Amino acid sequence: MSCYIGNLTGPFHAGKPMRILLIEDDSSLAEALRKALQQQNYAVDVAADGLSASHFLAVESFDLVILDLGLPKLGGQEVLRRLRDAGNLTPVIILTARKSLGHKIEGLDLGADDYITKPFSLEELLARVRAILRRGVNQSAPTLTHGRLVFDTVSRTVRIDDQEAQLRARELGLLEALLRSTGRVITKQQLAEHLYGLDESIGDNAIEVYISRLRKKLPSHSFSLRTIRGIGYVLESPE
């Protein structure tokens, strides 16, 4: 396995689990990276070959792609080329054993956002992941306001009348999804996709449990959530 795993000193990513697609054919390395990223509260899906990766990228949305170049069935350069040709601007970190300057220039010219060679420091990879994801967060509205409730999407904090609400990571992620869909129906399936990776086990009533927790922790005057039976939920627009 071509990485150095030291002590993880960076902060855990508090809030909605960002979705990462890890494209790596070395199963041992892929599993180690998956676990390390999940420990940082990222939702991680793994593709072991280029064709599977291209399919994932065509039908699913991700916040970041970590891409090996030496892939079976379809090479990493072609995966990246197809992604960019389709107009998909999802950030990509190339993680590869190919160290030559020519390979690095080619990868960056194809549209990669970063290029890391193996062996690598896991701490450095996680730092680069955080930096790229921060870039994406900062491109969207930094705060979401709903009546007297203010959600800071950068610091991942929620305040009501200047008092901070104590919410856990997936509660924050669920609240963000609801706030971004205020006044519109959002289905349980959409909420589940927002919170979990493709292969994560989801209990039948997981979304209901998190919704119940939000209702208990947030006062009704700032969080009026209506259940649409059999479909999903609507966060009512504040008066």
Image (cartoon, rainbow, N blue to C red):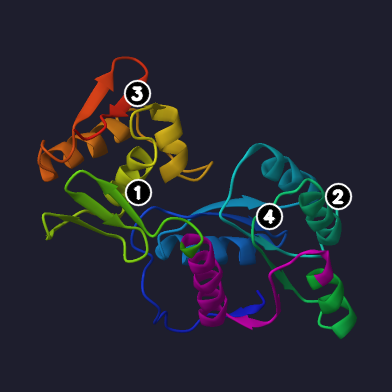
| Dot 3 or dot 1, earlier in sequence | 1
Mark 4 is surrounded, within 10 Å at the Cα level, by few (under 14), some (14 to 19) or many (20 or more) other residues, namely: some
Q: Nearer the viewer, residue 237 or 209?
A: 237
First in sequence: mark 2 vs mark 1: 2
Gap in angstroms between the C-alphas marked 3 and 2: 39 Å
Q: CA distance from mark 2 to mark 1?
A: 35 Å
Which numbered disc covers residue 73?
2
Q: Are marks 3 and 1 in contact (CB under 8 Å)?
A: no
Lateral position of residue 110 relative to residue 199, left or right: right
Which residue sits furthest right?
102
Say which mark, if any, is on residue 173: 1
Residue under numbered circle 3: 232
Residue density around tag 1, few if under 14, some if 14–19, many if 20 or more, within 10 Å: many
Whole-percent x, y for residue 176 in the image: 34, 46
In magenta, the rendered stretch is 109-137
**Count of residue discs:** 4
Q: SS of the residue at dot 1?
A: helix
Question: Hey, what amino acid is under mark 2?
Answer: Lys
In whole angstroms, how far apart are the C-alphas of marks 3 and 1? 16 Å
